[in-house]
Image: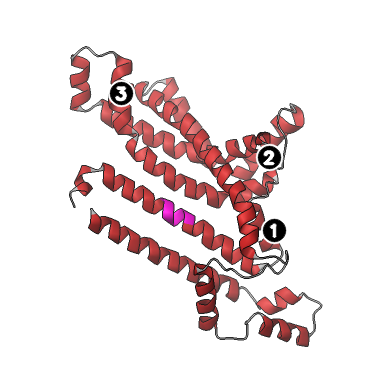
């Protein structure tokens, strides 16, 4: 088990380092950063002054090394556009994104697991087909289109919920539904598959032969084992949702990390873009590592290693 965790940790660190290198190079190879910062009307002298001021005249390897050392110390420099510390901007916006991700994940779990259980119990019936159709639609529907549809229906026409902002809990309802629907299909299908496998196992047949009622068999014996991989998947899905919050936050005007990334990209604010990409990637890698370790702890075949 210790060997497994060590290997996964080394893989996670390697992926994080690779992401930092790729994100750094992509931004620096996308064009002349000094010219983008100075603007189209800047003179050659002004561009050169900015290049020296931000260290863009140094070799690319040296630039990356200095940036990585500072990033490890949570020092991402200063925003070109907002004229504030990048870490201050992230500290202000990150709680909003985490709140949205947590609400979306909770909603996805509350809907996907019961729906997967019902679909497994009612296999090959219209209920099962309806649940699978729900999953297919959830995967095929673009999140920005679904978000706009929610705004038109519940904010514009019905006036039940606000269309944007983050000043109260009502402002998080529509974005949480939009983002949570993204994670529901995979969790629902995994729950259904796990329940079908468990319901056909020997110990479930034994439990039924002892005269236990069906609700006890399903909820106490079958669901407890079928939901184990869903818990690990939920951690991975949370990482996906944090990355996907860029679109959802832009649609609903939530001032979270995703909205900050969008504003920074549109204004060529490279220090903020690099920091946001790295932080979201680290969150996703950490959640994936947690999911792998959780699977290992719950899997007897890995527990003995």
| Residue 112: quarter of image | top left
Give the main secondary structure of the magenta stretch: helix
Secondary structure found at label 2:
helix
- Rounded to the nearest angstrom, the CA distance separating label 1 from label 3 is 49 Å
Above or below: residue 1 compared with residue 202 = below
Task: Residue at 34%, 40% (x, y): give it.
Answer: 229
Q: Which mark is residue 148?
A: 2
Q: Earlier in the sequence, mark 1 or mark 3?
A: 3
Task: Residue at 53%, 69% (x, y): give it.
Answer: 71
Viewer-side residue, 221 vs 154: 221
Report if residue 97 is visible in the image.
yes
- For this view, does 189 lie left or right of residue 296? right
Q: Which residue is outermost to the right? A: 41
Secondary structure found at label 1:
helix
| Residue 231: quarter of image | top left
Between marks 1 and 2 in the image, the one whose residue lies nearer the viewer: 1
Task: Residue at 64%, 76% (x, y): give it.
Answer: 31
Query: How far across and how far down the image is residue 232, in percent?
Result: 37, 43
Q: Which mark is residue 263?
A: 1
Task: Residue at 27%, 31% (x, y): give it.
Answer: 197
- For this view, does 302 lie left or right of residue 166? left
Q: Which mark is residue 303?
A: none
Q: Earlier in the sequence, mark 3 or mark 2?
A: 2
Q: Earlier in the sequence, mark 1 or mark 2?
A: 2
The stretch drawn in magenta includes residue 285: yes
Q: Which mark is residue 220?
A: 3
Q: Which residues are magenta?
A: 283-287
């Amino acid at each position: 088990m210790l060997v497994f965790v060590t290997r996964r940790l080394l893989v996670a660190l390697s992926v994080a380092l690779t992401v930092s290198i790729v994100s750094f190079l992509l931004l620096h190879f996308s064009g002349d950063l000094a010219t983008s910062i100075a603007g189209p009307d800047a003179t050659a002298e002004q561009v050169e002054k900015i290049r020296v001021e931000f260290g863009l005249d140094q070799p690319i390897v040296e630039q990356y090394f200095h940036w990585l050392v500072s990033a490890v110390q949570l020092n991402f420099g200063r925003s070109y556009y907002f004229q504030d510390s990048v870490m201050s901007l992230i500290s202000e916006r990150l709680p909003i994104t985490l709140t949205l991700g947590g609400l979306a994940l909770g909603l996805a779990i509350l809907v996907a697991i019961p729906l997967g259980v019902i679909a497994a119990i009612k296999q090959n019936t219209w209920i099962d087909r309806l649940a699978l159709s729900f999953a297919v639609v959830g995967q095929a529907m673009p999140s920005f289109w679904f978000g706009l549809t929610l705004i038109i229906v519940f904010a514009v026409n019905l006036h039940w919920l606000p269309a944007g902002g983050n000043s109260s809990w009502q402002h998080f309802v529509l974005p949480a539904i939009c983002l949570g629907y993204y994670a529901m299909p995979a969790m629902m299908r995994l729950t259904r598959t796990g329940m079908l496998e468990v319901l056909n196992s020997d110990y479930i047949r034994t439990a039924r032969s002892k005269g236990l009622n069906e609700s006890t068999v399903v909820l106490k014996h079958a669901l407890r084992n079928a939901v184990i991989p869903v818990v690990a998947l939920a951690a991975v899905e949370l990482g996906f949702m944090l990355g996907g919050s860029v679109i959802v936050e832009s649609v609903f005007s939530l001032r979270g990390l995703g909205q900050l990334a969008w504003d920074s990209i549109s204004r060529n604010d490279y220090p903020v873009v690099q920091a946001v990409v790295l932080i979201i990637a680290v969150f996703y890698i950490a959640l994936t590592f947690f999911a792998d370790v959780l699977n290992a702890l719950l899997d007897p075949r890995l527990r003995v290693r």
